[in-house]
Image: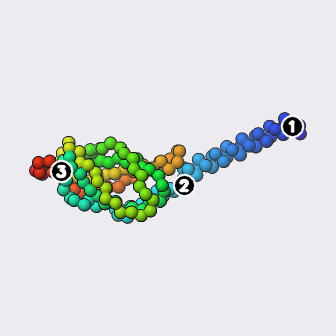
Amino acid sequence: MNKIEKLMYTLSFLTITSGVMFGLVIIYWMVFPYRVIEWNSDYFPIVTKTATQGGSITFIADYCKYRDMSATISRSFINDIIYTTPESTTQRQTGCHVVNIVVPIPQELPPGNYYIQTVYKYDVNPIRSITLIHNTDQFTVVEAGGKP
């Protein structure tokens, strides 16, 4: 075997090995069961069951977070209509925590009974994101003047 054949054999071996390794990394990224966050209740309890338009509502999040990564959050106020608020980014601490989360009530949100659906999106690797959905308990929005 001359030097050129030996070089071609080595390059072929390295190319095939690199391709197999890359394929294994992609498969691992696609199927690994990432455990990012878990909630310790079925829904987020509301602190005060009544809120005014333009005010705020507070709910309690009881969670255990296992990975140090930020989430893109979108929240929707849901009853007969779905009112979606702009996305935001949050970075919660790892570990188990109980926190109060204050959400502003849009001024233009019609009075009525609502719950908030929060969608958390975690980009766990370059090809995969995990989306988790968690809801609050129901609450009532009243007009800013106090009328239901």
The amino acid type of the residue labelled 3 equals Thr
Q: As drawn, is 120 to the left or to the right of 140?
A: right
Of the numbered discs 3 and 2, the one sitting upstream in the chain is 2
Secondary element at tag 1 = helix
84 relative to 114, above or below: above
Residue at 63%, 46% in the rendered image: 23
Query: Can you say which quadrant of the picture contains the N terminus?
Result: top right
Of the numbered discs 1 and 3, the one sitting upstream in the chain is 1
- Asked if one can make out residue 44 in the rendered structure from this viewpoint, the answer is no
Residue at 74%, 43% in the rendered image: 14
Q: Quadrant of residue 63?
A: bottom left
Secondary element at tag 2 = loop
67 relative to 8, above or below: below
Q: From mark 1 to mark 3, how far is it between C-alphas?
A: 81 Å
**Mark 3 Cα within 10 Å, few/some/many (few <14, many 20+)?**
many
Residue at 26%, 49% in the rendered image: 104
Please state which of residues 83 and 90 is positioned toward the viewer in this rendering: 90
Q: Which mark is residue 52?
A: 3
The amino acid type of the residue labelled 2 equals Phe
Residue at 32%, 48% in the rendered image: 75
- Whole-percent x and y of residue 54? 20, 46
Number of the front mark, 3 or 2: 3
Q: Which residue is mark 2?
A: 32
- Asked if one can make out residue 94 in the rendered structure from this viewpoint, the answer is yes
Q: Which mark is residue 3?
A: 1
- Whole-percent x and y of residue 100? 31, 59
Circles 2 and 1 in contact, beta carbons < 8 Å: no
